[in-house]
Image: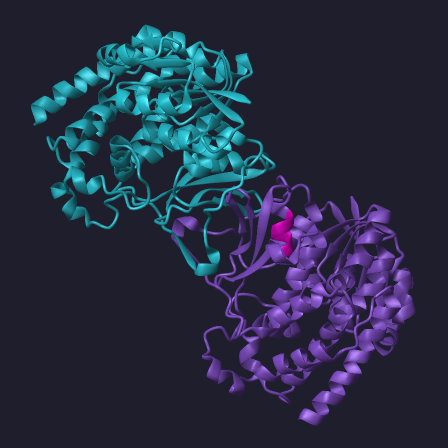
Chain colours: A cyan, B purple
Amino acid sequence: MKDVLIFGSSGSIGKSSLDFLSKHEEFRIKGLCVNRDIQTLKKQIDKFRPGYVCVVDEAQAEKLRKVLSPKVRFFKGESGLKEFSAIESDISLMAISGISSLVPLLINIGYTKRVALANKEAIVIAGSLIFSKAKLKNTEIIPVDSEISALFQLFMRKYDEFEKVYLTASGGALRNYPESDLLRITAKEVLAHPNWSMGQRITVDSATLVNKAFEVIETHRFFDIDYNNIDVILHRESIVHAMVEYRDKTVFSCLYPPNMSIPISYAFFYPSRVMSVKGLSFEKGLKLSFEPVDYTRYPLLETIIKTAKKEDNGLAVLNACDEVTVDYFLRDKIKFPEIAGVLKYFSKKYPSAIIKNVEDVFYWDRWAREKTKEYLEKLC
Amino acid sequence: MKDVLIFGSSGSIGKSSLDFLSKHEEFRIKGLCVNRDIQTLKKQIDKFRPGYVCVVDEAQAEKLRKVLSPKVRFFKGESGLKEFSAIESDISLMAISGISSLVPLLINIGYTKRVALANKEAIVIAGSLIFSKAKLKNTEIIPVDSEISALFQLFMRKYDEFEKVYLTASGGALRNYPESDLLRITAKEVLAHPNWSMGQRITVDSATLVNKAFEVIETHRFFDIDYNNIDVILHRESIVHAMVEYRDKTVFSCLYPPNMSIPISYAFFYPSRVMSVKGLSFEKGLKLSFEPVDYTRYPLLETIIKTAKKEDNGLAVLNACDEVTVDYFLRDKIKFPEIAGVLKYFSKKYPSAIIKNVEDVFYWDRWAREKTKEYLEKLC
């Protein structure tokens, strides 16, 4: 029996994971944590009966506390989240989105044997802090992101003598629109991702390839692969998630249907695999296509990777800038192509500094949020 | 420095392998053996200066002996082939085609550390004899066949928890002809394989899927996989060579361009990989398609696998029958669809017997050749 903590249980990955875990008796839900969605959390408490519960939003926390059984240990607010992160477990699912995951993640690494990591931003901005702590504490970090999970599985084989990694990108919701249409695209159209059902920001990030740039950085962090050996190719079907090319030019690819069930189950059962029935149907016919990425159309892929190579505060800045800018786009306050414009502007304007610790991350995160808002308010 | 013996050096795989080996100083060609093509052999002797040479055809052997340096140890005829097979080496390439490879292969397993096996028929007909001898002598058998090499590479990863193996078939030269056209197809049209350049029989066997049926049997023999867990799917591009589906429905596939250079280099360098420049170009765009096999159009796939499951002399019979029948087709004496008719007839008519040793193999091989010729002469 393995004790599991879920950080972000009311989100898309959190829910899918609980659904998966409910079918496997090997796991016991020890703790659940949400930001503010106590309606979802209440149902999950009734079903899974965790001993520990955390709600970060103080007002929502108070509402829940009133109806909670006194047997449950309850945590609230930022300080409560830190205490919750220090509960011992066998596996933790880190599915808090954005940079808020960083502090609980760094604490939790000291109290769990394995982190199933569904959050990208923490790795993108503070990958070296996370991996050095994980190494120190001998804690496994297993990616739940589908492309990175595919790579992780591919690298179970001989790691050396490989030459290149290919990450695939669907191209997002706007891939079939002519570039001239992009100015009049609404948020609603961008949110209709052809293959994946995900959160709002990541769906917009898929259309700008910011999400793919983050995965390139994750690949660099997880597997210590030089940026020059990571290529992104357009693959509309989202079935091949990653490929590795060896120096004799043999390519191994990892395929599964475009949903999170395999990355989730793999992160929990690794190095074993659990039986599943829903697979690809080659017998029914399947077409897979690969196309080059149009870097003019998707300028942010290059912008962000160029920034990543600087190994400074740039990714903390651009991540915050992207989150704020996408929010403005989602509220129809700016046009789709302006997202790239804003990020490109900040990629050139931020004062370069070294990230030495978590405080630095949050300093530059706040700095970028403020500056981006100022900039956007002038723009609107 | 590794000593290499080449069995069948004048054939397509033999030539490609020598071309490859000539670029790698780690290997020294210790011996060369051909059936009858002494013109090609002479050039190879001049270039590689092997210490041992064998020509199976006695008349051709005599011609070569006259011009051969007395320093070279020379072998001729069937008995010479047996002696040649007992020369010690680090790696032997077995690229003799057909069932003639069986005796030298079984002898050679006792005198080499690794057989790079390019021959299919020996495994198909006498796989258990070969693998039990290899186990006894602690000799590696590395497949050079492209699909089986792809599987071998895929199975370098975790072997258990897999559920299904997919072998891909191009469909051969006739895949785009309507079935109604097959009666008036000439040998020339069948020999124009869209993706691979190979020998004549194997090109016809690709159009009938007899070749694919043999690979299914190789898969069963090499990896001890139940026939029910091996699927064939049509893949026109011949770029994905094999796929393995695990029980969580993750699929790993192995891709490379449709030529023999990777399987050849892998068999010689395994477990290492040698640098190569000619790879796939995902960046330039690539389309991969998978379709179900039409078992009505390709009836022999089922016929041969059904026979294989009997684990009797059936494959020795059908292999010989196929070789003779294909020869009649190549000489325009029968029509293309009649190949399937003849094999299906013999699959029902042969007297079932157990193959206990090499003599049994040759007995049923001769039996089937005679009976097939009789049958075909009546038919023509």
Residue B14 relative to residue A182: left or right:
right
Most foreground residue, B217 or B271:
B217
Q: What stretch is highlighted in magenta?
A: B148-152
- Residue B151 magenta-highlighted: yes
- Residue A153 magenta-highlighted: no
Residue B359 relative to residue A146: left or right:
right
What main secondary structure does the magenta stretch of the protein show?
helix
Q: From what the image shows, is residue B140 above or below residue B361?
A: above
Q: Which residue is drawn at 38% across and 19% down?
A: A32
Examine the rendering and report whether any part of residue B59 can be seen: yes
Q: Can you tell which quarter of the image residue A370 is in?
A: top left
Q: Residue at x 49, y 39 (%)?
A: A164
Q: From what the image shows, is residue A295 above or below residue B346?
A: above
Viewport quadrant of the C terminus of chain A = top left
Expressed as whole percent of the image width and height from the top left, the position of residue A310 reads 36, 22
Most foreground residue, A204 or B286:
A204
Total labels drawn: 0
Expressed as whole percent of the image width and height from the top left, the position of residue A209 reads 30, 37
